[in-house]
Image (tube, rainbow, N blue to C red):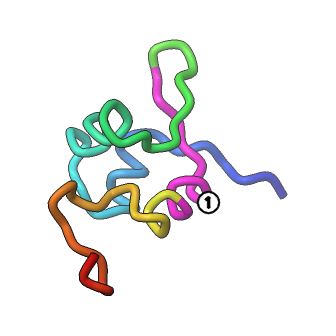
């Protein structure tokens, strides 16, 4: 079965953040998203991988290692 495309609202709920954060992350942090017409769509697996790689981390945040 193919993975469904999610909307901004759905991906924001999945991550527990606001829609504004999603739009900001698309623009500033490279959140994986695809624009279909005027709508942004997301694959949960791509977004989850991006989060695991540290994509949502604050610029001033430190890693667990103290980097």
Relative to residue 7, is residue 24 drawn left or right?
left
Q: Residue furthest front?
A: 67
Residue 22 to residue 36: above or below: below
SS state under label 1: helix
State whether residue 41 is above or below residue 48.
above
Residue range (magenta): 39-49
> x, y percentage for residue 30?
43, 40
Residue 5, relative to residue 16: is it above or below?
above
For the point 84% across and 58% down, which residue is it? 1
In the rendered image, which quarter is residue 9 located in? top left
The residue to which callout 1 is attached is 45
How crowded pointer 1 is (Cα within 10 Å; few <14, some 14-19, many 20+) is rated as few
**Residue at 35%, 42% in the rendered image:** 29
Q: Position of residue 39 (x, y in %)?
A: 46, 23
**Nearer the observer, 8 or 53:** 53
- Place of residue 21 in the rendered image (x, y in percent of width and height, measured from the top left): 23, 45
Place of residue 38 in the rendered image (x, y in percent of width and height, measured from the top left): 45, 15
- Determine which quarter of the picture holds residue 14: bottom left
Name which residue lies at 61% across and 43% down: 5
């Amino acid at each position: 079965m193919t993975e469904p495309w999610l909307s901004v609202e759905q991906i924001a709920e999945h991550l527990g953040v606001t829609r504004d954060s999603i739009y900001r992350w698309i623009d500033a942090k490279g959140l994986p998203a695809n624009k279909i017409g005027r709508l942004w769509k997301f694959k949960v697996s791509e977004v989850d991988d991006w989060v695991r790689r540290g994509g949502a981390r604050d610029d001033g945040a430190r890693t667990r290692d103290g980097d």
